[in-house]
Image: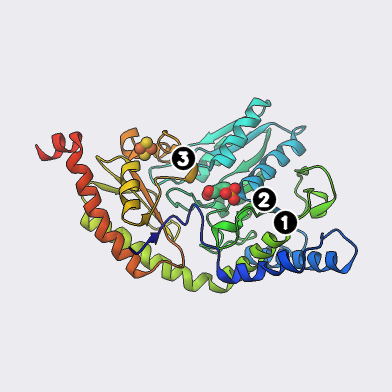
Amino acid sequence: MTRVYMDNAATTKTDPQVLEAMQPYFEKIYGNPSSFHSYGREARNAITEARDLVAELIGADKDREVIFTSGGTEADNFAIKGVADALSDKGKHIITSSIEHHAVLHTCEYLEEKGFEVTYLPVDEEGMVDPADIKDAIREDTILITIMLANNEMGTIQPISEIGEIAKEAEITFHTDAVQAVGNIQVDVNQLNVDLLSLSGHKFYGPKGVGALYIRQGTKINKFLHGGAQERNRRATTENVPAIVGMGKAAELALEELEEKEEQVTKLRDELIAGIEERIDYVKLNGHRTKRLPNNVNFSIKYIEGESILMKLDLEGIAASSGSACTSGSLDPSHVLLAMGLSHGVAHGSLRLSLAKYNTKEDVEKVLEVLPKVVADLRAMSPIYNQEIKS
Ligand SMILES: Cc1ncc(COP(=O)(O)O)c(C=O)c1O
Ligand code: FES
């Protein structure tokens, strides 16, 4: 059976060129980057090179503004707790949205327990935050605005540049979680008007367990891990050199390939969307139709449980998801879809197909052949469907 992987928003296959770039840093160049000898120096140089490549991908200042972390979650925690810590004398109010990843939402909830106040802005039915709402929510004591660039579940791309203008004018630190965006669309920290930006290696063909936080020069933020003086004294612990090198290589490839792959993946996405809408009744595309990630397809399929579609698709060799990897592990329907106004029942019947540069036209054809059958089979067993539609 040919297998189709369409869960690339959860994680991507590591590019073979990335793997190849990492290999020597396990076998030959294994020194500690803080060591004085040549082994250490070589490792240090590799980190510098990787940092430059990541900086280049997001338009940051080379060498100074990129801090490597253990992933997107740590970058989000670092940004939010670091700013809250540094600016708590100035104020204790944070603005975010109700559709953020749990790495942001749970961090905000933690800070609420510590005495901070958080405004969770609503989104419209396409999952869009209204910049006017941000303006209205700003208070005298607001110290941080954190809004994601692109949503992991339904792919809507937020007006970050515009929100950044508002933040800049009000002199409030602005963070964006760009974990899903980097490598899929062009991301430039200056064009976006952000002070802080999170990214993660494994979402764009790099290894897992490595990410980065962009910190604009002059941004007030406290260090995240206490200990040694690594990462400009902002994040202690011996650097994960092979992973950092891998992320650097992934960034280099992303920059080279972005335009071509974006076009290729968008085409497949649009074929999937059109094909599903044509072949299956009672479906609703979640998220914005055009302002969406090139690799994201998310449908609510009425009268069906998300989990049962996933199981059936898996048996047919198709790997998909019903929301974010974290959400699908729980029995709660997606907080993102609920925030967009979907009912519990409809939110439960959601299916996310997320593409990568490795997906082909044949993959799309297979999904379009299998999915309608799976849906028909499940609906045939659904009492509500039989009652409402068939009668
Ligand atoms: C929007 C968003 N933020 C943060 C994360 C967490 O990234 P990581 O898995 O690297 O910790 C993810 C991963 O699913 C994500 O999609
Ligand atoms: S339990 Fe059905 S989609 Fe979550």
Q: CA distance from mark 2 to mark 3?
A: 21 Å
Residue 88 location (% of width, % of height)? 74, 33
- Helix, strand or loop at label 1? It is loop
Identify the residue under disc 3. 327
Q: Position of residue 22 (x, y in %)?
A: 67, 66
Quadrant of the rendered image containing residue 40: bottom right
- Relative to the observer, which residue lies in front, 275 or 293? 275
- Residue 262 tag number: none
When the figure is inspected, residue 350 is found, relative to residue 118, above or below; the finding is: below
Relative to 310, residue 255 above or below: below
Q: Would you say 353 lies left or right of 262 here?
A: left
| Cβ at disc 3 under 8 Å from ligand 2 | yes
Q: Which residue is mark 1?
A: 240
> What residue sits right under mark 2 in the picture?
70
Residue 7 visible (yes or no): yes
At label 3, the amino acid type is: Thr
Residue furthest left as drawn: 391
- Which residue shows up at 14% across the image and 37% down it? 386
Q: Residue furthest right?
A: 36
Residue 360 at x, y percent in the picture: 38, 69
Is mark 2 in CB contact (under 8 Å) with mark 1? yes
